[in-house]
Amino acid sequence: MLAPEGVSAKKEALGIGLGLLASVLWSLTAAGRIGAEWESTLEQAAKGQVVTLTGFRGLLGGALDGFYFVAAAMVLLTVWHYAKIRKDSPSPGENVHLRAMAMPVTGVLLALCVSLILYAAYHGVFSENREKLNEMINRPWEAVENGGGDDA
């Protein structure tokens, strides 16, 4: 019922799951970039150097691109399902659209949900790190402004 006759819905679900897993693993590049920025910024600040911070979009980069590929693959899967239905039966029946669209729509929805969850998680980590960096960087300036660094 979830795929055209002769097509294994279980195999398609496994393929979609593996695609999503690969996308999640690929998305970890964003976590790596956020961590690398954290370390380099701490090092620069400790040396008294000017600190430049990368925006969230720059750190995210193409980390969620795997989910776009999964969604694009679902379009191709839909085309293949309709071609299979048309080839195998001259009168497809009443469940033709359900059989053709069930797995691809599920794949797109899962890709969307997982990518949004990861986007929110990475943005949360980014925001937390950015707040800590701002506090650390601004601490010496606040001391100067409050008269702690003024010897005159």
Image: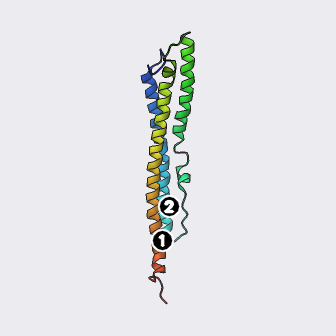
* 133 lies above or below 1: below
Which residue does the numbered mark 1 point to in the structure image? 138
- For this rendering, which residue is in front, 108 or 96? 96
Give the image location of residue 99, x and y in percent: 48, 20
Give the image location of residue 23, x and y in percent: 48, 39
Q: Residue at x 48, y 80 (%)?
A: 145
Picture disc at residue 40: 2
Task: Tell me which colouring the rendered structure shows.
Answer: rainbow
Identify the mark nearer the N-term, 2 or 1: 2
Q: Residues within 10 Å of mark 2 (few under 14, many from 20)?
A: some
Give the image location of residue 20, x and y in percent: 46, 35
Amino acid found under the numbered disc labelled 2: Ser
Indicate the secondary structure of the residue bearing disc 2: helix
- Name which quarter of the figure residue 52 lies in: bottom right
Give the image location of residue 56, x and y in percent: 53, 54
Amino acid found under the numbered disc labelled 1: Asn
- For this rendering, which residue is in front, 100 or 152? 100
Tell me: 12 left or right of 86: left
* 87 lies above or below 11: above
